[in-house]
Image: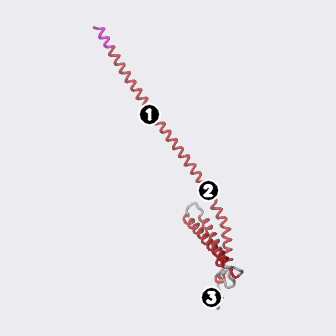
Amino acid sequence: MTPCPDCEPSPWWYLFDATAFMTRDRCGDFPAWLVALWVVPSVLLFLAYTAIACRKWWTALAMRGTTFPWWASLTVGGFFVGCGVGHLGDALAFVWPAYRFFAFWSCYTAVVSLVGVWAIVRLSRWQEWQWTHRAEMERAVVSATTQVEIDKYEMRRLRHDLRNKEHAVALAEDMLRLKDLQVEAMARELAALRGGGAG
């Protein structure tokens, strides 16, 4: 029955109309425990898939303007939404058997799943590139750190050599002063000998 008997039903009403179908529990012997076994996991799966999709979409929006393929993350989020609503339909079929809508949603999920495969490949390639780039950066950091340590060692060695050279120069100056004193003493002795000889 349409909402308005004298009006032409819209395609959307026809899509969501469930009057032509029976609820799932009327299609067989469904005790209460079996209905619960269908409904509860289906709702939990819907919530889990929706949470994953929201996280993927948040990541896509946060990473816009970077090298991250945010559009691929959006596509993967759409795939999770498709799966989640599909599981929700399994639960709703016990009270609202809108099988036309469920069929339409299955087609959407199929299409977005095929696109999602390509999106996951793009994300995997980006992650591989990130890992390779990170490994190269880590090697560069290790190389630069090693070079800095080598430079520090060379600087310490040069300072040590310089101190040794300064010590050698000071020692040579002391020896020269000692020799000057010796020469002066010899000169005084010579002068004294000459004075004694003249007397």
Q: Residues within 10 Å of mark 1 (few under 14, many from 20)?
A: few
| Residue 89 visible at all | no
Mark 3 or mark 1: name the one nearer the start of the chain. 3
Q: Where is residue 39 in the image (x, y as percent from the top left)?
A: 64, 76
Q: Are marks 3 and 2 in contact (CB under 8 Å)?
A: no
Q: What secondary structure predominates along the stretch shown in magenta?
A: helix
Q: Kindly identify the amino acid type of the residue bearing the numbered disc 3.
A: Pro
Residue that sits furthest to the right in the current view? 28
Q: Is mark 2 on a helix, strand or loop?
A: helix
Q: Are marks 2 and 1 in contact (CB under 8 Å)?
A: no
Say which residue appears at 47% left-offset and 34% top-offset.
Answer: 161
Q: Where, quadrant-wise, is the C terminus in this rendering?
A: top left
Q: Is mark 3 on a helix, strand or loop?
A: loop
Q: Mark 2 points at which residue?
A: 129
Mark 3 or mark 2: name the one nearer the start of the chain. 3
Q: Where, quadrant-wise, is the N terminus in this rendering?
A: bottom right
Q: Is mark 1 on a helix, strand or loop?
A: helix
Q: Name the residue under label 3.
A: 3
Mark 2 or mark 1: name the one nearer the start of the chain. 2
Q: Residues within 10 Å of mark 2 (few under 14, many from 20)?
A: few
- The residue stretch that appears in magenta: 190-199
Q: Kindly identify the amino acid type of the residue bearing the numbered disc 2.
A: Trp
Q: Is residue 180 left or right of residue 84?
A: left
Q: Where is residue 64 in the image (x, y as percent from the top left)?
A: 55, 64
Q: Mark 1 points at which residue?
A: 163
Q: Kindly identify the amino acid type of the residue bearing the numbered disc 1.
A: Arg
Residue 143, relative to residue 171: is it above or below?
Answer: below
Residue that sits furthest to the bottom in the current view? 6
Say which residue appears at 68% left-offset and 74% top-offset.
Answer: 106
Q: Where is residue 6 in the image (x, y as percent from the top left)?
A: 64, 91
